[in-house]
Structures are given as C-alpha cells and as structure tokens.
Image (cartoon, rainbow, N blue to C red):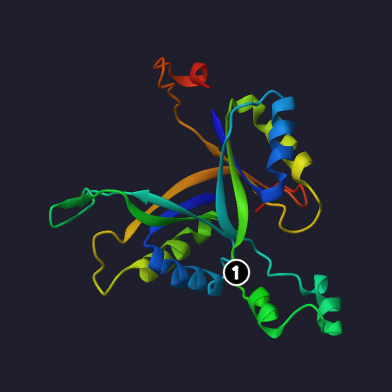
Amino acid sequence: MLMIKSIIRPEKVGIVLSELCDAGFPAVTKYDVVGRGKQRGVKVGDVHYDEISKEMLMLVVKDEDKDDVISIIMRNAKTGEKGAFGDGKIFVTSVEEAYTISSGSSEL
Amino acid sequence: MKEVTAIIRMNMINKTKNALLKEGFSSLTCRKVLGRGKKKVDFSVIDEAISEGTIFSNTAIEEISEIHRLVVKRLVTVLVKDEDVQKVVNTIIDANRTNSPGDGKIFVTNVTDVVRVRTAEIGTAAL
C-alpha cells in the first residue's frame, strides 16, 4: 500500500475530490496547511508572503492504483494548460499495514 | 521506528488518549481533519424519519446524500518502536471499535530517523 499526500490549491479541492470519487477512490482525508515552496512564497509589492494556505489531501491506495491517482490529481489540480508555480506537490510514501477499526480487519 | 496514523471519530479522542496512556504511550499528536471513506451515507439509518416526513426537509436529505460530503475526524499520530506497533494498533482498535462504518482507519508507516531537538539524540533514544 502507498500513502499519497498531495498539497494543492484550496480552490482545486472540489474538482480533485469529485474526480477521485468518480474514478473509484472515495476515501480521502483532507486538512488545511500553510507553506511555501521553492519560489520562497510570493512577493506582492514590498510585502513578502511565505505562509500560503494550501490543502493537504491524504489517500492510502493499493500499489497498482498509484499511477491512476497521481494522474487524476495532476490533471485536475493544475491551473491552466501549462500549470503555474504554486499548484502544489505530490509525495508518495509506503504504508506497511492498514487496519479498519470498525471490523478490526487488517486491510484497506 | 514506526509511525502509527489513526483516523478516528471526534468524540473518541479522550477515550483513545486514556487507553494509550494506560498502555504507557503518553506522547501523541492530534489534528482535526476532514475526510470520507469508502461508503456513502447509510440511508437505512434515516429511512424511518424520511418516511414519516417529519424531521428532514428536502434540502437536508439532498445535503446528506451528497457523495462528496466530508466528515470531521480526528487524526492521531503516534511514533513507536517496531515491537510496540501491534500493541498500539490493538489499543486504538479496542478503544474505538463500535462495529459500524466510520470508526476509522489505522496506517503504519516506516520512520527512517528521529531526532530530539533538545539534546540532538538520534534514533530510538530520541523517542
């Protein structure tokens, strides 16, 4: 299993979540984060903002679903055709075990 | 070292904290998250109320039936030694299990290294 954590623009959350659901990945956890990237935040006039609010989407999926999920997020979280700085990042880490509390079973 | 990430019901946090403390795991991190699981909202729970037509207005039913509705949950992170993983997982399951969907999930991931900031200790000593 793999945990896919993606940091995306708050305004893109709706479309990403509905596309994930349509593609058969309804299970998601989301939380607000603030952060900056390689561009060191944004500069508007003389003011420098380096705590830009983003949304973190966390999914745990089977290994074979990784490419699907990543391409869905990539496609829908992008701004415009080419994308822009600040569209976000996707990180993939491995999950060794997963348990469902209601049934106590050791599976996704 | 392993990181145990549990997504549980909001009102179960105190019970979980106490259960973990009793087992000797005092340190944990929590945060409020929004999420959804595999299942949609179970209509059988509110069928009666709908058929009576008393409590729910049409808009309420519409809202509740939205597939993308996210539910507020608590995300608990506990870092433990490899040999304690099973104990922590079982403790969390025992404290949170109500046998109904929505009780949550537990994920176990590997942690490469831990450093205690105060003393710069590395590895299990820093836990």
Residue A71 showing in the rendered view: no
Residue at left 44%, top 49%? A92
- Callout 1 amino acid: Arg
In the image: residue A19, left or right of residue B55: left
Dot 1: element: loop
Q: Total number of numbered labels?
A: 1
Is residue B58 visible in this depiction of the protein?
A: yes
Residue B42's x, y, as percent? Answer: 75, 70
Examine the rendered structure and indicate whether residue A98 appears above or below residue B24: below
Residue A30 image point, x, y percent: 51, 57
**What residue is at 13 percent from the left and 57 percent from the top?**
A45
Q: Residue B66, relative to residue B127: is it above or below? A: below
Residue depicted at 68% across the width and 66% down the height: B39
Q: Nearer the viewer, residue A19 or A107?
A: A19
Q: Callout 1: 10 Å neighbours few (<14), some, many (20+)?
A: some
Residue occupying the point 52% across, 59% down: A64
| Residue sitting nearer the eye, A13 or B85 | A13
- Outermost residue toward the left in this view: A46
B62 to the left or right of A30: right
Give me the chain letter of mark 1: B
Q: Position of residue B16 (x, y in %)?
A: 71, 38
- In this rendered view, identify the residue nearer to me: B17 or B109: B17
Task: Tell me the residue that label 1 is attached to.
Answer: B69
**Residue in front for this viewpoint, B31 or A82:** B31
Image coordinates of residue A60 in percent, x first then y, are: 55, 53
Q: Quadrant of the C terminus of chain A?
A: bottom right
